[in-house]
Image: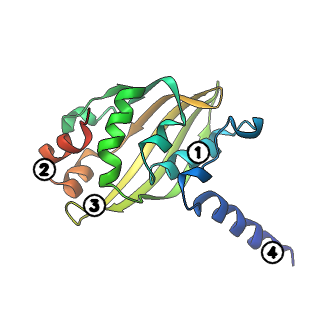
Amino acid sequence: MKKTILVVLIGLFISEVFGQQNSNQIKFSNEKSKVLSGEEIFNNLLLAFSFNADSVIRLFDKDAIIEFPYASSLGTAERLNNQEYYNYLKGGLPNMPNIKFKNIKVYPTINNAYWAEAHGEVKIPRTGKLYKQKYVMYFVLNEGKISLYRAYWDSIAGQKAFGHEQSLKEIFNKN
């Protein structure tokens, strides 16, 4: 009986976190005066990536810094402010529709800082190829918003799925 209840509760949790149908169902820290945990905010971020740039950027502080240490190898910026990141997402996310994440792990550290891991997959419409990426992310929260976000990923996986380097520059360098 206890196992059945546990399985049902886990199922409800998974459907609540990952089964949401639109970005209006993403929970934000300022709703209902509830402060979300770092893990909840991170899960919301991964979910928002499958919607649009507006859904993602709502999770970030207006003065947030976003860093991609390996991006320069693809000809894209390593460090972005909030507006630059929004433009980056406007170009990139439509080319990665409904990206799904699994093997999600979040590790709280100190001072509202977290390390996280996730595996993302999506079929790229432009090439028909499967994009598979292992991400390691570091993020810092300030009043329930992401103020620093640093993502480490394999640039070769992007080249294989999106096409040559010029394609990536065109997709992710939108103004």
SS class of the residue under badge 2? loop
- First in sequence: mark 1 vs mark 4: 4
* Residue occupying image coordinates x 70% and y 61%: 13
Q: Mark 3: give few (<14), some (14-19) or many (20+) Cα within 10 Å.
A: some
Report the Cα–Cα distance between label 1 and label 4.
Answer: 25 Å
Left or right: 166 in relation to 58: left
| Residue type pointed to by label 2 | His
- First in sequence: mark 3 vs mark 2: 3
* Residue occupying image coordinates x 60% and y 42%: 41
Report the Cα–Cα distance between label 2 and label 4.
Answer: 50 Å
SS class of the residue under badge 3? loop
- Who is closer to the viewer here, 160 or 76? 76
Q: Mark 1: give few (<14), some (14-19) or many (20+) Cα within 10 Å.
A: some
Residue 3: mark: 4
SS class of the residue under badge 1? strand
Mark 3 against mark 1, which lies toward the viewer?
Answer: 3
